[in-house]
Image: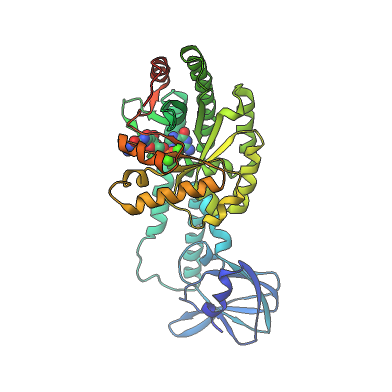
């Protein structure tokens, strides 16, 4: 049995045991490797091929690990491993490590790569093998550049936050039924010292990769909830019979990956003095898809503070609709792609219709994003959407401009 056929189990389990009879090869030098092995009981021999001659470089016994390098980097097996006795092996799938490695900060990844590449070099020299190609380790260089870029980016963002270069803008979300403002979505902006704007589509992913999103997210939560109080007051003053506007805050999946971070956010919500009924948290589908069990725990934890939860960009990346009902969700936000294409594509209109039906049957409200034409309002209303936002009504605005807008008691 070779590695590939043993690997058939990989889809199901990330750790399992196999027994390799004495004399069998576990893997060969040069093969692709996606698993590591721990010797539960038995003995193996590690050898390398030297110009057609076999050179044994180690014998390993109970409790020792081998094949571990290939699960961290993509390089082929650097040696051949043969069972000397009937050997029981615990097989550890690469998949088991990919998430933590991917989640590790860039410095950690760089460190891993450096250690690995040094180790491989040392192994080559020990065995007297010449690295004929002598090509530089490009993957190492790439990782190093990436790590440097991230570290610089984090330092810049951190400095930017201190220098108050980050600001929140707020985009009105209207009730499609009344045509009036029902709430706002808080959207982050970064205006650098030199006056240039960096799009959140650019810096949010960077902040996520560096872990800085936690700090940035706490700041945006505080800022947005303070703005909600201001807008609620302005609304009460200008339009006494209007309901209190809600504030919808974007929360990255990274912020919800640690329960301690959720507790931080809950504290900010408690301290804000904003009624949780007027707070909505928006998160994207990926969070739910990647780790549904954790997501369910995290979302239930978040719900404890009384806020409502919305799924952002709905329809763009969900692999299974059947997941939906297991999460405590209150709102679906239909991605602007669908809204945009509604008139030109029957498909998009049908998708919007089905999402609306789905939301109704799950007792959720629906927000349509990216409304740019008045015909879209009519169509969306007809399909059963409750709320809408888009440039037609208003672009995201600084808090002062929102306060001024509220005073005009606008309707669309
Ligand atoms: P998103 O949450 O889907 O936000 C909606 C985006 O659509 C915003 O882009 C908004 O300005 C834009 N938009 C609204 N109406 C229209 C329209 O009618 N037409 C068009 N073409 N665009 C419209 P923005 O502000 O550039 O934000 C981009 C993304 O960055 C957001 O997408 C969100 O994923 C992320 N983001 C922004 N602020 C935050 C934040 O405070 N925290 C986190 N975690 N992510 C944020
Ligand atoms: Ca959003
Ligand atoms: Ca969105």
Q: Is residue 184 left or right of residue 328?
A: left
197 up-or-down from 232: above or below: below
319 up-or-down from 8: above or below: above
Q: Position of residue 7 (x, y in %)?
A: 55, 75
In this view, the residue in front, 234 or 74, is 234
Q: Position of residue 281 (x, y in %)?
A: 54, 36
352 up-or-down from 88: above or below: above
Q: Is residue 220 left or right of residue 266?
A: left
Name the image quarter holding residue 181. top left
Q: Quadrant of ligand 3?
A: top left
| Residue at image coords 43%, 17% | 403
In this view, the residue in front, 350 or 292, is 350
Considering the image in quadrants, where does the C terminus appear?
top left
Considering the image in quadrants, where does the N terminus appear?
bottom right
Does the rendering let one see residue 199?
no
In this view, the residue in front, 30 or 272, is 272
Instruction: Residue at the far left: name it.
Output: 344
Instruction: Residue at the far front: name it.
Output: 382
| Residue at image coords 54%, 42% | 364
Q: Position of residue 163 (x, y in %)?
A: 44, 23
369 up-or-down from 160: above or below: below
Q: Position of residue 79 (x, y in %)?
A: 51, 75
Q: Is residue 369 left or right of residue 228?
A: left
| Residue at image coords 55%, 63% | 95
Name the image quarter holding residue 174. top left
Does the rendering let one see residue 118?
yes
Name the image quarter holding residue 62. bottom right
């Amino acid at each position: 049995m070779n590695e590939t056929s043993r690997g058939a189990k990989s889809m199901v389990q990330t750790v399992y045991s196999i027994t390799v009879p004495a004399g069998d090869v576990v893997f060969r030098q040069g093969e692709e490797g996606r698993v590591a092995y721990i010797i539960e009981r038995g003995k193996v021999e590690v050898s390398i091929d030297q110009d057609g001659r076999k050179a044994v470089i180690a014998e390993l016994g109970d409790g020792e690990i081998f094949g571990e390098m290939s699960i961290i980097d993509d390089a082929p097996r650097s040696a051949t491993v043969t069972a000397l006795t009937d050997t029981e092996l615990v097989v550890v799938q690469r998949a088991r490590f990919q998430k933590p490695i991917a989640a590790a900060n860039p410095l950690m990844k760089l460190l891993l790569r450096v250690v690995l590449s040094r180790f491989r070099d040392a192994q080559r020299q020990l065995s007297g093998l010449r690295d004929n190609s002598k090509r530089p380790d490009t993957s190492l260089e790439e990782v190093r550049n990436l790590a440097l870029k991230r570290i610089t980016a984090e330092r810049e963002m951190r400095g930017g936050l201190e220098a108050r270069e980050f600001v929140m803008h707020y985009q009105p979300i209207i009730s499609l039924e009344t045509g009036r403002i029902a709430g706002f979505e808080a959207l982050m902006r970064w205006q650098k010292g030199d006056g240039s704007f960096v799009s959140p589509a650019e810096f949010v992913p960077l902040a996520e990769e560096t872990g800085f999103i936690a700090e940035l997210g706490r700041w945006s939560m505080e800022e947005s909830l303070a703005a909600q109080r201001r807008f609620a007051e302005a609304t009460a003053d200008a339009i006494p019979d209007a309901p209190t506007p809600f504030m919808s805050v974007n929360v990255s999946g990274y912020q919800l990956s640690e329960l301690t971070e959720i507790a931080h956010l809950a504290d900010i919500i408690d301290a804000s003095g904003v009624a949780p009924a007027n707070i909505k948290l928006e998160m994207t589908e990926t969070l739910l898809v990647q780790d549904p069990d954790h997501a369910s725990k995290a979302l239930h934890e978040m719900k404890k503070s009384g806020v409502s939860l919305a799924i952002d960009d709905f329809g763009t990346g969900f692999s299974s609709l059947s997941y939906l009902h297991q999460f405590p969700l209150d709102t679906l936000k239909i991605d602007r792609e669908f809204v945009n294409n509604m008139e030109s594509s029957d498909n998009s209109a049908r998708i919007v219709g089905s999402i609306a039906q789905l939301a109704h049957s799950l007792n959720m409200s629906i927000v349509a994003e990216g409304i740019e034409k008045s015909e879209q309002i009519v169509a969306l209303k007809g399909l059963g959407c409750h709320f809408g936002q888009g440039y037609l009504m208003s672009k995201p605005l600084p808090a002062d401009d929102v306060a001024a807008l509220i005073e005009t008691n606008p309707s669309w």
